[in-house]
Image: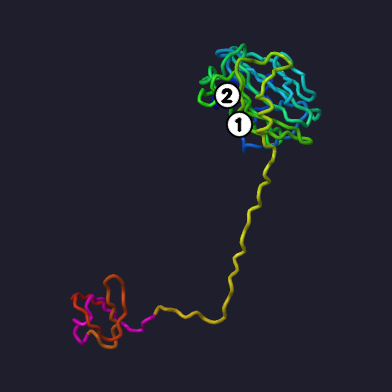
Amino acid sequence: MGEILLRRMQGFREHLSGFDDFQIMQAPAATFRVPIVSGEITILAVSERDPTYWDFCFADAECNACCWLERETFSGIKHSGDLLYRKDLLDYVKISNELTEKPICVFISGYSYTKITRFLGTHPAMLVADHVDKILYIIPVPLDKATIGDAMICCPLVIKRDGDSIICSILPKATTDGNMYCSSKKLVTPAFPEAIKRADFTISEPQAATTEEMKVEKNDVAMESDVQVSDKRHAILTTNPSALPNFLTTGEAQVIRFGTGLEFIGNRAEQNNKSAVVLP
């Protein structure tokens, strides 16, 4: 999808050149915030007109609608209308501080009663722009029949102005409806009030990383070591200390028994295995 999206956006450089140094990535969370930047594109949709127009629209709880034909239904939202380049389609909106603080649905409409599933495989994209961090966030829009059935409109996103910013709520399940498409200021459907009901505009504040201070207490008393250091001049490695001749087990040699580990022997030990190596 990434290469297809970039290629399509290149065809609309007259409108989208301001995004040349933006990163494109998935939305950071189901609910996130972007600042309002006057005169700049806030939300856009890029698609291919196959089989037809993947219309990019807005609506409120009272089913008032803004679309390619009715571009200024809501104060503070200005729709671009359909912009074409070969078979590609661009629609975008610029949002200002005049926007109401009531929730607004962002939805897709299949032109002329086209099922949304027919756009599957054409890789359409809906994006939200953060002009401060220079990021375009991709909003997932379901296109498969298992998720949206025979829907002709699909609402995956609800936005709400909060002061100088827009809070975006990606719905856990997009709302849909059939036997309709948007081409006027009114589109009556329960999908819009239901989408607003599902929206969550609560943004979890990032938690500060908690660090535990590691305190090391110094003790003036020397710690007792379990390791015994031998001061003998020679060492004998053996699996059976009892088999060693007497001249090897004098006080000048440290006898070390090995098997599953090492064991330092005082003078003599009784074991059964026979093997020894004398080390200088």
Q: Which residue is mark 2?
A: 5
> Does residue 262 sit above or below 198 in this rendering?
below
> Does residue 38 sit above or below 262 in this rendering?
above
Instruction: Give the magenta-colored segment's residue range.
Output: 228-247
Q: Indicate whether residue 243 is drawn in magenta.
A: yes
Q: Residue furthest right?
A: 98
> To which quarter of the image does residue 99 belong?
top right
Provide the secondary structure element on which disc 2 rests: helix
Check contact, mark 2 vs mark 1: CB within 8 A. Answer: yes
Q: Earlier in the sequence, mark 2 or mark 1?
A: 2
Q: Is residue 83 left or right of residue 116?
A: right
Provide the secondary structure element on which disc 1 rests: strand
Measured as percent of width and height from the top left, residue 80 is found at 72, 18
Q: Residue furthest front?
A: 190
Measured as percent of width and height from the top left, residue 32 is found at 67, 37
Question: Please, what is the three-letter code of the amino acid marked with disc 1?
Answer: Ile
Question: Please, what is the three-letter code of the amino acid marked with disc 2?
Answer: Leu
How many other residues sit within 10 Å of disc 2, few (<14), some (14-19) or many (≥20)? some
Q: Which mark is residue 24?
A: 1
Give the Cα distance between marks 2 and 1: 10 Å
